Image (cartoon, rainbow, N blue to C red):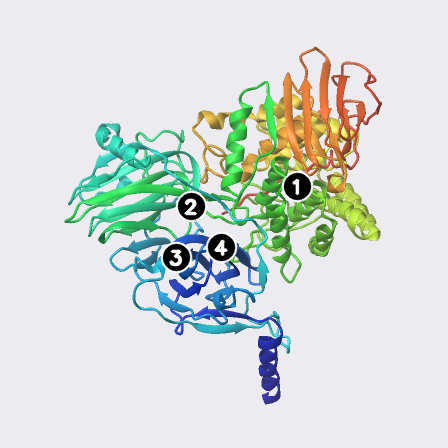
Amino acid sequence: MPIVATLYRIHRIFCAFFMSSTTWIVPSIRPAAPFVMAYRLHFSSAAAETLRFSASADERYALYLDGERVGQGPERGDGENWFFERYELAVAAGAHTLVALVWTLGPEASPLAQMSVRHGFWLDGGSASSALSTATGEWQCMRVGGLLFRENFTRVPSFYAVGVDLQIDGAAFPWGVRSGTGEGWEPAARVVEPPKRYRITGELEEMHALREAILPPMFQQTLHLGRTRHVETLEPGTDTLLQAVQSARHDAAAGAAWDAMLAGNGAVVIPAGAEVRVIVDLDNYYSAYPILTTMGGAGSIVTLTWEESLYHTARMQRPPDKGNRSEVEGKFFYGISDRFLPDGGAGREFETLWWRAGRYVQFHIVTGREALTISDFRLRETHYPITVRSSFSAADDRFAPLHKLGIRTLEMCAHETYMDCPFYEQLMYVGDTRLEILTHFTLDTDSRLPRKAVELFDRSRDGFGLTASRYPSHVRQLIPTFCLWWVQAVHDFSRWRDDAPFVRERLAGVRTVLECALAHRVRSGLLGLMPGWNFVDWVKGWTTGIPPMGADGTHCAINWQLVLALDAAAELELEFGDAELAARYTRLAGEQTALILQHYWDAEAGVFRDDTDGKYLSQHSQCLAAISGRLPLSHMDALRRTLPALVEEGKAWPVSIYYSHYYLEALRALGLGAQWLAKLEDWFELNNLGFRTTPECGVESRSDCHAWGAHPVYHSYSTLLGIRPGKAGFAEVEIRPLPCALAQLSGKMVHPLGMIEVTLDRSRAGRLAATVTLPPGLAGKFSYGESTVELRPGVTTSLDLPEPGTGASESAGAQTPGEPASASRITDATRVPSTALPSGV
């Protein structure tokens, strides 16, 4: 094929010179992963100026100007969405050095969420700073020595996907590398990438499809914090995994010295030939880069281990036995470790390439022939910059710590993507992410991270049209139920934020997901098993979260999920797409509902059976049925009686902490305020058990920080205060508070146009006094029981309404009769947003 080959070469040359190709730099001989390369550029400025350039790398980079860290990246994406950051850096006249540390760990050593095309560094200075560009600048490179990536430091009791541990050998590490000094630098080689993803002959090109970063820089701050909970001198060779914390061995005097050092006031000296361990309680959950500064101590080994909480057992078991998260006595410590080997020099700063997470940090220090001085230990905290603009208060003072837990969890699970958990996986799963987005929407107007999440899942779709269950991830996983939750997430975005072009771009993905699901209906018309992991919930008694099914391989909850997705898609099409498709989806949702009623409804028991054989029963099927907005009133009345009692009587599998979002939504749809508040006891107890964040599955959890458990924050605004979008784009607001026993509630929820303020007072028997203030430009309505009042933009409205069931609707301003709470129609209020599914295995 010489002619084709010649055409291809011509095409590459044409792209390189005429179509904005990108030039990356690499070492002349590429090492086998994992490895870290340093790239440097010496340059001079004739006068003070501002450097403007863009930069990216594969896999990741840290950028230094004259030895000071000035940036990092790239924002996490995939090959077709390889992000770059823009920089504006002020420099004085004179000589300067830019250094980029770039690491490529490879698929075996990198975090599962880290994608890669091939190693390289790219910088474009444009016309103004062209001398800085990797295409023209005199860049040099050097492999960074002294770094070892290995797995055997870390021991955790479950699936772990954050990559291997790091060892830094101070004797081999080039300490001046961040300033661009030292020996061993050589000219970097260049690789030109074409601007098109496909070759002229249609083959897929190996390249980075560069795209400007969507997100702002991560929030970062340097902190001195923590207090010692245990300090002890160990016998040489002690395996700390097998030695419980015992207060009788605690060295209080040494603990005081460590506390002073942790606060930034002094140093700690570990004598030669010693072995000690120190357990530090950060007293909150953090995601942070640890920075350890040492002096002396040649031959020492410092193992730094992070953990969320300590364990009652030395042997790892499932479920883990942790108990009260604030207690350390009699417990064992094992977690994620990195290892630092001081070389004896002064002012040696050891820092990990990637951040760690948890509440507790353990130092296990073994010194050699030389004493080791710990001069400083600090954390560079990092997470997505969530600005909490909303506020909520209730007569029950337990809500304040609940919100503190939930907001901290959301912060710790929000970085360059949302994450299921910061400790074990750091993966963005559709199910988790949907709940995180909803919670985020109630707190802040910033929609950049939600937008990125929804879009990346769209771009993750495979040849069948199904979204990946988690993305980015270099190991593809398919959970078909998550594909349906993604449809709901698109619908959520369309309601909470006003961005019609973005939503329209998602419609093709929504359609393909639904068509793939519809293609897996069995002979009866019910949705059967789809390819992949048919996960529903983490329930004891279910195998890996997959519920038992009947002989036909169908499940009631999954079929209800299809109905929810079809109805969500119908609204999307009606508002942003094709009215004919909207009618089709509505018809299909109705047909699917009829089949569900025919095959799963147990009229005598007043419940939906999980399987067509009638053997199994769970809360899950009842929850999705209740929030579907498609049940006859008689069925809603039946569920109002049966749903809360199912688990109390031991008749049904209960929902988990994550699926309890659906449970709370179902109770809202059924008007069961007392039972709704009772469910929050699961969260109120967390504060008493020492939690600083919400866990994955309750007290017996693998992960202590899972943001799908933060949804009570969302519900405080959207259910208790009742603030939800009334139209697409949040063009109107519908406020429908849940009738309950809380005497006073008040809150301010952020809206793109301003604050929505709601105050509720039930101190008078049988009456609700409400005050609502809307921002200018936003109209809406307030519904309570059988009363509905129109709300005007920029106006404060005071209402005096009867509690449901206490009497007829009374006039309160321009009030019109509303629909009974038990009515069955499809609105945003009745077909409430569903949550996220679990992450992890």
The amino acid beneath tag 2 is: Ser
The amino acid beneath tag 3 is: Asp
Q: Does residue 791 lie above or below 610 as drawn?
A: above
Mark with earlier residue (4, 3): 3
Q: Quadrant of residue 735?
A: top right
Residue 741's x, y, as percent? 64, 17
Q: Are marks 4 and 1 in contact (CB under 8 Å)?
A: no
Q: Does residue 253 lie above or below 510 as drawn?
A: above
Few, some or many residues within 10 Å of mark 2 (<14, 14–19, 20+): some
> Going by the image, does 46 lie left or right of 716?
left
Which quadrant of the figure contains the N terminus? bottom right
Outermost residue, bottom direction?
2
Name the secondary structure under disc 4.
Answer: strand
Name the secondary structure under disc 3.
Answer: loop
Few, some or many residues within 10 Å of mark 4 (<14, 14–19, 20+): few
Residue depicted at 60% across the width and 21% down the height: 394
Per the model, the C-alpha gap separating discs 4 and 3 is 12 Å
Mark with earlier residue (3, 1): 3
**Which residue carries the number 2 mark?**
158
Name the secondary structure under disc 1.
Answer: helix
* Residue 522 in sight from this viewpoint: no
Per the model, the C-alpha gap separating discs 1 and 2 is 28 Å
**Which residue carries the number 3 mark?**
66
Q: Does residue 327 lie above or below 440 as drawn?
A: above
Per the model, the C-alpha gap separating discs 3 and 1 is 59 Å
Residue 19's x, y, as percent? 62, 73
**Which residue carries the number 1 mark?**
557
